[in-house]
Structure formats: C-alpha cells, structure tokens
Amino acid sequence: MQIRRTGFFLIGIFCLIFNSYAQNIYLGNKIHFTRSEEEESYHLFNQKENPSCRIKIRFFYPDSYSDPAILKKVQTIFAEDFFGAGHLSASFPISQLAKKQANQYINEYKKAFAESGISKKEMGEVRRSDEQQFTEEYNYDQIKEMRNTILFNRGNVLSQVINVYEYGGGPHGSTTTQGMIIDLNTGEKLHYEDIFKPGSERKISSLLMFALQHSDKYTSKQKLSDTGFNADMIPITNNLVADEDGITFIYNTYELGSYILGIVEIPLPYSEIVSFIREDGILFPWADKKRKDPEQVTYKTYTFNKSCIPAHYAQYEGFNGFHADIQFTFPASVPDEERLPEIQRLFIHNAFGEECASLSPDDAMNQFYSKTCEAYNQSMNEPNTLSYIKELLTGVPVHRKGYMLTTFSKEYTQRNRFHYYKNDLISYTIDIFRYEGGTRRIQTENPFTVRISTAKAVGYADLFTPNSRQNIANRMVIALLKAKGYASINDLKTEGYDLKKIRSSDQFYLSDAGITFVFQTAEIAPNPLGIQEITLTWREISPFLSDFGKTINPL
C-alpha cells in the first residue's frame, strides 16, 4: 500500500506544491488569495563573516470573498495560525503581517545578542586566534522559513498546510507542519469532532495504524520500531488537511516517536472512512461521492475485531494470542436488484473463500475467524510446542513471560479498497496483513474487478485482445523503468528484478489513470522491495483493448 499525495514529509516537496498550485489558486470557491513574500537577513555587527539570522516568509492569504463577515473570520484564522495570536489588528492588516514578522524576528535576534554582552572586538579576537573555537562558542546562526500551501479550495471546503523550519544552533533544525480545514459556510476551523462521528476514535486509530504499517516506507511494526516509533495505537489529532480524495492526519516530530521518525502524514481515503464521517458535516458529500458510483451502487461496511488466547496461555499477562481485525465493505444495493445476491456472494468469496460464499458478511467473518482460531489453538497445544515453551519460560520472571511469548502471537488484518466505480464495473483490492511470528510481517494485495450487470469477475481476456500479452508485458517493463528512473533494463536486473516474470495476468485493478498490474512480494523483485504495482495508462493500452475494453476507455 502506498501512502499517497504527501506521504512522509520532505520539506522540498512543498516548493513543488507552491509552484504548481500558484496557477490554480483562484479556482474553486469564490475566495481570492494574494501572496505576500518577505526575506530579511542580518549579520552581527553588519559583517558577512559573522553569524547571522535569516527569515523567509511566503504567505498566501484571502483578500476578498462574497461574504465580508466570513472573510474576516477566515483572515483571522489564517493570521493566527501562521503568525500567532494578536498580530492582526487595524494597525497591521493581513497584507502587512509578513513584513511585521520579518522585522520582529530580526529585532529579537539583535536584542538577544545585545544581552549576551559580547563585543565586536571580543568576537574578532577569538575568530583570529582560533576559528574552531569561534565556530563552537559563537554559534549564533538562526534561520526561520515559513510558508503555507492552499491544498484544496472547492465545495465550500478550504484546506491549507503551514510549514515552518527553524534553526537556532546545534546539529540540526526543526520542522513543523500544521494543517487546517475551514468550512466557508461558517468561516470556522474544523476539528476532529466536527468531521467524524462520536465514538469513531478507536476505529480511526486502527485505520491509521494499518495505513502506516502498510506504507512503502514502513512495511512492518519492526521497521517502525527501528525508527523510534513507540505508540501502540496512533492518537487522534486535530492536525488535519482534506482534499477530494480523503483526509490526512499529520503528526509532527516526536509525537509518534524519536527524531529519526520525523514528520508523519497518514492519508485515509474517503472510501475507507465514509461510514465514520458526520452526515451533517461539510466533508460528507465528498466522502459520499467515493462510496457511490454513477450506477448508484451503495455499500455497507462490516467490522470484526476479536482475539483468542488458548487456555494454557491465559495466565501470561501481555500475551495476545491470535487477533483478527477485519473491515469488509461490499455492495448493499445495485441498479439490478436481482443481481445483488450474486455480486455479494462474489465479494464474500473473494474475501473469505468459497466455503463462506453463501453466508452473510457477519457469519462469513465469524466462520473465517473460528477456523483460523481453531487451527491456531491446535498448533499452540501440540506437545512439541508446549514442551518448547515450558523450557523457554523456565527461570523467566512472571511479568516477563508474556513478552517472551510474543513470537507465538499471530495477527490478521484485512481491508478492501475501492479504485474504480464506472462503466458497469467495480474494481477493488483486498489488502491482507499477517504476522505469524518472528520479525517479519507478510502483506498481500489481491485485486478484483466485477461487472455489475452480469455479476461476473472481469479478467485480462475480457479487456484485451488475444495476441496482446507480450506487448503489454513489454510496456510494463518500460513503465517500471520510468517509475524507477533507470536508463537500462540492466539497472532493473542489478536491483534483482526478474524481467521474465513480468507478464500480464488477471491480477490487476482499474482506475481513472489506467490499469495497474499487481505482483506479490518476491514475485518479480527481491523480498525487501515488497509488493510491486505497475500502472499502464489508458493511452498506452489503447491499441490492445478488446471491443469491451474500448467501451470503458475514457480516451
């Protein structure tokens, strides 16, 4: 699973965002923005070789809107979140705040240094006698960079992010990211409780953890731990941004772990959280669009969260046994109601197997869990296992025994994600995350495409002509080269890719961008590279589409 859009924060990304967004900043809601920029610097005693302070500000702010009262409220939010409370006043309108902040920063630097009592002569003497001592003792360099980006500005929803970098000496600076979502109907900044239903916190926290563990950067809890992640559950935050695809939760450095973890941004797509969003909230229409396709297919989400611990092991505090966390979304209604039972059966079959296909979602999840739990209990109660654990725990303090059994714990997490809802088709993936002992987690991503009017699975042969497979395989290799930024297939081979195994199959899902072929871990690339997705655009596959494939090609 890929953390989309912002992923994990890199400060350089926002420079690109600014450049690309500046052309579109006046579109969407009828609120007009102006950019204010300031850059000031000062060297001690006005000598360039001396330590200095520098401040750079790029501030987008609203300067006109159809409702003056709403405009004033939004300007106040922008000013206070960017510069702090108390800056906006009749004497200092929003257009002058960047200049005021830059002057104030320089003056505070001068004042702080003046209070140190260090003279120009003293500083010069130390510099001339020992440059290293000067660098160590007179580390008065300061930097501050502030900028905001308008991320979304449509449907009476306004979302921005503020990025601040500060350096005040020492081995590194610090960066903070602050998001906000504003309802332009009221001019109010939204918090978690304004967006999500009461009681949703635990489920959203679980979704955040799942998304983080399934990101490209942190594919397991062990890898998270290696970077200083120290949270059992991810806390809810009001540091949020939104766009047409979903809501992103932002955690600044040290909020989830050590400095090395850095700023973490976790986007949750609307398709996964729509059932938890307040229906009277400004974001619900955006979320609802992701749940309903043009053919008016509606969906219902079922959740299952349960653990089992074999009787022999209940005495060990901290031992979790087997835990299942399933969120299963499937169609609740389709245009042709006669097809609904067949479609539902297909969804349940894909998720839980043929033996569960005729059951209801709740019964299917319970049966799947019961069989898995039964197999787990049997394995844990085998004589060899019991003998090994008895020997393992000999001499171990009581409070540590549960911890020693951690490698015998098992976890199973399952989600389905929807990618495409058009042209009589539903295309989705089932993400499965398993922990079966040891230090590694196992992740699989199973894609499916269903034709609504026939209640049948759609495969490669339905979309492409019979003789297209080699051409599609060749284009996948080219697409992989582009995605990796490599110039030659030898670069792919050096990284461990087995190009002979890159071939067309029924393991794909559709999206507005095109078709994405999914290769499981170690299928075409070394195990550390994880699941591989190769996307071919509609334009790239256009010459090879079947008659049916051509009917869904947006080009």
Image (tube, helix red, strand yellow):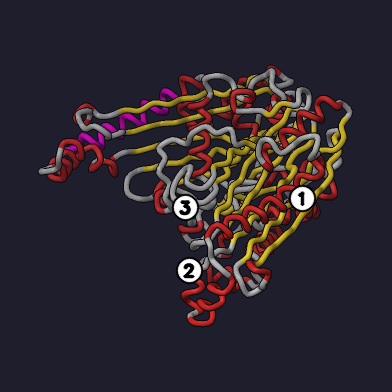
Q: Would you name the residue on which mark 1 appears?
A: 99
Residue 203 rendering spot, x and y as whole percentages:
50, 27
Badge 1 crowding class, 10 Å Cα cut-off, few under 14, some 14 to 19, many 20 or more, is some
C-alpha distance separating marks 3 and 1:
32 Å
What is the span of residues highlighted in magenta in the rendered image? 365-384
Q: How far across and how far down the image is residue 531, in percent?
A: 53, 52
Q: Which three-letter amino acid code belongs to the residue tagged 1? A: Lys
Distance from the alpha carbon under mark 1 to that under mark 2: 31 Å
Whether residue 506 is visible: no
Q: Which residue is mark 2?
A: 137
Q: Secondary structure at mark 2?
A: helix
Residue nearer the viewer, 271 or 547:
271
| Residue found 38% across the figure and 37% down from its top | 411
Query: Which of 207 and 346 lies nearest the eye of the viewer?
Result: 207
Instruction: Name the amino acid type tagged 3.
Output: Tyr
Residue to which mark 3 is pinned: 259
Q: Please, what secondary structure does the residue beneath circle 1 have?
A: helix
Circles 3 and 2, Cβ within 8 Å, touching? The answer is: no
The image shows residue 510, relative to residue 302, as above or below, that is: below
| Amino acid type of the residue that numbered disc 2 sits on in the rendered structure | Glu
x, y percent for residue 103: 72, 53
